[in-house]
Image (spheres, grey):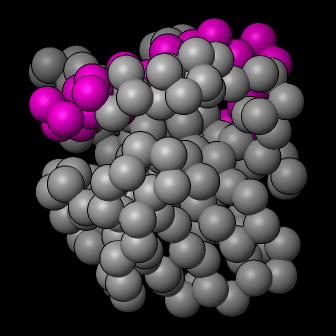
Amino acid sequence: MQTLVISAPVVYGGCAMLMIIRPARESDFHALNHIRESAVRDSTAAGSALIERLHRWNPRRSYAKPAYWRNAFVAEVEGEVVGVAKTIGPMLKDLWVLQTKRSLGAGAALGRAAENAIRADGHRVAHLYTAAFNARTRAFYERNGWSMVRFTQHAVGHFRRCVYVKRL
């Protein structure tokens, strides 16, 4: 993964703050798992039911080991990790931002960092999956240049998901 650090000023609650996009470190492990699980719970009312189904299938599934977070970028605001984006090959695997820190631009900045990493790995098209029921997330990806190409069924959660692609 390239060593990328992006700093940008953001305004939140009338205060100017610095947002940093940087590669994830092993010390971010607990924060990243917390972000992922809380973002899924907050995404829709169905999110908590989905988490419960995933926990019954594999109780440790939602808590990833530190090695899982390789090839990930984090958004940090005032020293707090508020979001994460992870890539695997040409896939944007995870993009999560804490609900209380949304609308700062962290999601878009993390998405750009992930797209740049995918492009730097030689891929010209990126893809991702997201839950079909999550209208807010689908709108976010569409605002950021992604196109939905088809629906699939999630093998474990048994819900419809959308496949998105983006030319890089």
Instruction: Relative to 98, say whether 132 is above or below.
Output: below
Does the image show residue 29? yes
Residue 65: % across, % down: 77, 21
Quadrant assignment for the C terminus: bottom right
Q: Nearer the viewer, residue 144 or 104?
A: 144
Instruction: Relative to 6, say whether 165 is above or below.
Output: below
Residue 156: % across, % down: 50, 46
Res 139 → quadrant: bottom left
Q: Nearer the viewer, residue 80 or 88?
A: 88
Q: Residue at x 35, y 76 (%)?
A: 151
Q: Is residue 165 magenta?
A: no
- Range shown magenta: 22-49
Residue 51: % across, % down: 39, 26
Give the prevailing secondary structure in the magenta stretch: helix
Q: Nearer the viewer, residue 69 or 149?
A: 149
Left/right of residue 10 with respect to residue 84 in the rendered view: left
Q: Residue at x 77, y 67 (%)?
A: 89
Left/right of residue 136 with respect to residue 2 in the rendered view: left
Q: Nearer the viewer, residue 36 or 99?
A: 36
Does the image show residue 110? no
Task: Report the number of discs.
Answer: 0
Q: Residue at x 74, y 58 (%)?
A: 88
